[in-house]
Amino acid sequence: MSTSIRVSDETKEKLTRLKRENESFDELLARLAGEEEPVDVGSWDAETANRARRAIDRSRESFGR
């Protein structure tokens, strides 16, 4: 059985950057959905959240994303 999921062009570009070589979008989504529950960022204070955002940005820059 197959299901279509509509996403914006921006979202598709982000997913494409996360997709591994030789990985289908179905495999990508299954991998992402199977990861541990995300950290509840809402429980962080503003400075901790900002430090996390900066760390993520630096990480993405280092991988050319």
Image: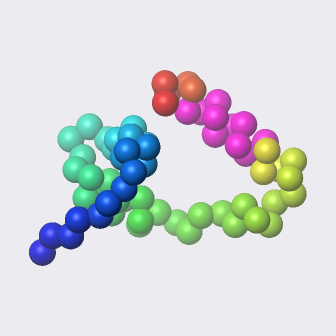
Does residue 47 appear to the left or right of 5 in the view shown? right
Q: Is residue 62 left or right of residue 45?
A: left
Tell me, yes or no, if residue 15 can be seen here. no
Q: Residue at x 66, y 63 (%)?
A: 39
Magenta residue span: 51-60
Looking at the image, is 8 positioned above or below residue 64? Answer: below
Q: Position of residue 49 (x, y in %)?
A: 78, 51
The location of residue 50, given as percent across then percent down, is 79, 44
Q: Residue at x 83, y 50 (%)?
A: 48
User: Which corner quadrant of the image does residue 4 belong to?
Assistant: bottom left
Please name the residue shown 38% across and 40% down the image: 13
The quarter of the picture where residue 38 lies is bottom right
Q: Is residue 5 visible?
A: yes
**For the view shown, which residue lies furthest in the bottom direction?**
1
Residue furthest toward the left? 1
Magenta-drawn stretch contains 10: no
13 and 42: which is toward the camera: 13
User: Residue 42, relative to residue 51: is it above or below?
Assistant: below
Query: How many numbered badges does the structure rendering display?
Result: 0
* 56 is within the stretch colored magenta: yes
**At 70% across and 66% down in the image, what residue appears?**
40
Which image quadrant for residue 56?
top right
Q: Nearer the viewer, residue 7 or 25?
A: 7
Residue 4 or residue 25, whichever sits in front: 4
Q: Main secondary structure of the magenta part?
A: helix
